[in-house]
Image: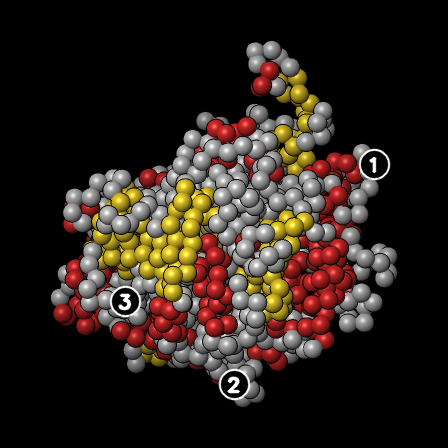
Amino acid sequence: MTEFKRDGSHLASCPPVEKWDDWVEYDAAAWPRRVEKHYQLVPTICFNCESACGLLAYVDKETGQVAKFEGNPKHPASRGRLCAKGPATITQIHDPDRILYPMKRSGPRGGGKWTRTSWDEVLQTFGARIRKAFQENRGEEVMYHVGRPGHDLIMDRTLQAWGIDGHNSHTNVCSSSARLGYLLWHHADRPSPDHANARFILLLSAHLESGHYFNPHAQRIIEGKMAGAKLAVMDPRLSNTASMADYWMPSYPGTEAAVLLAMAMVILDENRFDATFVKTWTNWEELEVDGFAAKGQSFEALIEALKRHYAKFTPEFAEKESGVKAEVIVKIAREIATAGSRFASHLWRGSASGNLGGWQTARALMLLHVLTGSVGTPGGHNLNAWNKFVPQPYKNPPPQKRWNELLYPPEWPLCTHEMSPLLPHFLKEGRGRIEAYFTRVFNPVWTYPDGFSWIEMLRDEERVGLHAALTPTWSETAWFADYVLPMGFSSERHDLMSQESYAGKWIGFRQPVLRVLQERAGKKFDYTYQANPGEVWEEDEFWINLSWAIDPDGSMGIRQWFESPYRPGQKLTVDEYYGWIFENSVPGLPEAAAKEGLKPLEYMRKYGAYEVTTDVYRQNEKPVTPADLSGSKVEANGVVTKDGKAVGVMVDGEAVVGYNTPSRKLELFSKTMADWKWPEFTLPEYCRSHIHRSAQAASMEMSAEDFDSHFDKRYMPLVEWPKDAHGEVCTLLPIFRLPHLIHTRSGNSKFLYEIAHKNPLWVNPGDAEKLGNIRTGNLLKVHTEIGFFVLHAWVTEGLAPGVVACSHHMGRWRLNKEDQIERMSSAWVDLQEVGKGQWKMRQTSGVEPYETSDPDTQRVWWSDAGVHQNLTFPVHPDPITGMHCWHQMVRVERASADDRYGDIFVDTNLSFAVYQRWKALTRPAPGPGGLRRPLWIPRVVRPEEAAFYMKKG
Ligand code: SF4
């Protein structure tokens, strides 16, 4: 068996660094002749998902062009390995349809007419509009909205330098829900499981296949398995991940927390929990539940109170809810207990992001870690904040004084991220307008629910004054922009990246390969677009230059943040920005570079990544620093404070840093939930989701007693179908992703689209029979609350009954037959607004071969582009996290003679009504003291503290 080495040296085909300047391979195209090709290898970072794996660009010395991408063995997280999307970068950079120059619309918005413009014109236009908005105190009207960030720090810094609260993200359609579950426990909002050293791994995400930090995690899960770890997967769908597991638990969606709490009860009942850990590291003494108050009581009394509270979660109850067999639940609970501190798990989207109350799945999962003492341990659950490293630049602007209610409205005081899926509805309600809107690697018309409401917003020049789409590829959203600004792919830009990929901290440096190589040869560039194809730029330089355009003479106080740390008053360059960080802000890097006679920036340009430390376990046990200890005091609850801020907690007579929660412990009991009007959720709980089977009235198999004891209408905005509705009611799972597609950026990756280009509706054979003997390939019509879509069936046993599923990666469409769009992945459609808010889409043609400079476009053999289901989904904001709850009740029936494959109909009047219904479930701010949201909960691009108060309490 091959021995894994951290430096990737076990990979026989990975070129050693000393040969990177002249790597020789035979030219495959010349076979059978042996013709040598000479390459120069330059490291960069993949941009095709958030994992930030290390790429090596192979630059052909003869042509000066990148010939292929492979893995960088010097990258500590990916260790030379990539998924299919990494090497596919080559198809993106050589795509003949890519956007090469800044474009400006030349007709009405959405009309599809564009003319080439210059970067200077773009900077002057946006600089003037934004400057005017700032001078008129309209800072809230400038918004940056990001899909895939692909960088750390620089954008937050830019927005704070502008003094605005203008950062919007896609997180509420992605991962907000799990984040709240985790942060209520330990402030950090993500897990960093140590899969490689685990003895038991439980996944509620499709990690081996496509999940969060996919490739770096997947290889470590397999490493763990090779060392003897068992793997369990809870997923209604037989994913590739589930197929690799020792146990597959096909749970009914939304019931996962019930299963996890039943496992916790097994561990409690069998007295197999780590009492010392629970007693030492949770805030158990603060717990109040069911009339029991732990304060002044013994730890044993607490355990008995917990057993009473969770008594209803028997394995049998969990089986009835979820469909997972009671004996399997007991067996896995025992395996978890046996693994003890070496129990690792992951949950990110799936259950959490599909369901109303999905955040409780993360909270319940963490309870298993707390009971087994597997927090901060080798092989256990670690905190993302412990394994991610974000260095600081030479100076940072102060936090903004503003609070933008278009981003963080009062109804959702506990949302972890911006309420971005609701932006069109907020504007419709008259909550504000946008003067300058930057969408960046972001395609809400296609990726978000309710895309037609986005089109209605984007085409309205009153609501959105000026819109620039910063994107490497054409998209449905860019179509409705005023400017389309081409930004680089992985090998065409600078970014600093770090992720919590394993038990260690690292940074990776994305760099523009052609610029770096030419600069090595002595050529000088002012800007990266001068070295990239066409005038493809990079965001770092764009934001620096736009900041100068907003404040050309420095009188607004903005320009100062974008001046060189080395040349006072001169414009900052990317070399200076990153050079300073690498010299001053990355421990150990200057020394590592000096050993090779390099400057830190040269080291990062040579290797592309650097491992900062592997000392990451049990950070909570670190002593409070002498500086923080000096002048501190110990509060009655053991929290150590200095100047009114918590800096640690007393444990066994020693002041240690603990966790960044109010109690500085893991919060089994969340007073925050009680303080913010949700007292029923102070402990990890299970609440039935909006798609619970009891909501499927027609197919409900529960007794009246079951129904009454667990069904709480407060949390269940039931779907109201029209009286004449027909078809079979099912739960739709619309959020699984195919491992080789890149959300909205696969469109020009010919290899990836050749691998898969359909998204049929998965139907269990039992349901297929109920629907009238449906067979694979039959045409089905799926009705949502606001419209319908038509697609083919795929009958499969790889899905729980009562559930249908459809991948969200397909269904790209274009309004133009030939221009400014990616043709190999999209259907050409006819889109009509047949009434106010009533939208009808029909495919005119599917994918067809076409002529370009790339002969492969003539060889396109597939015709199916898939069906765009998300357009037909209303928004479902969870009343607590604000997360869009993707799963939904649908009615499925055979398509009629009038229906055609790909047909879509939506009524946005209905989608606005659904939004109002879900909004009514919220319990708005203010909270204690007039706060907009708890001060201790993180906020993206955090304003100054005064801005957190709606009114002083
Ligand atoms: S997992 Fe794949 S797509 Fe994601 S960064 Fe790594 S190689 Fe790129």
Instruction: Pick the quarter of the image with the C terminus.
Output: bottom right
Give the residue displayed 57% in from the left and 14% down from the top: 31
Which residue is nearer to you in this view: 932 or 768? Answer: 768
> Which is more N-terminal, label 3 or label 1?
1
Q: Please, what secondary structure does the residue beneath circle 1 have?
A: loop
Which residue is nearer to you in this view: 644 or 496? Answer: 496
Name of the residue lying farthest toward the left: 703
- Tell me how far mark 1 sits from mark 3, CA to CA: 65 Å
Q: Amino acid at mark 1?
A: Gly
Q: Nearer the viewer, mark 2 or mark 3?
A: 3
Q: Amino acid at mark 2?
A: Gly
> Which is more N-terminal, label 3 or label 2?
3
Which residue is nearer to you in this view: 55 or 98? Answer: 98
Q: On screen, 594 above or below 854? A: below
The disc at residue 929 is: 2
Give the residue displayed 62% in from the left and 45% down from the top: 99
Residue 398 left/right relative to 366 = right
The residue wearing badge 3 is 719
> Which is more N-terminal, label 2 or label 1?
1
Q: Dot 1, crowdedness within 10 Å: few (<14), some or many (≥20)? A: few
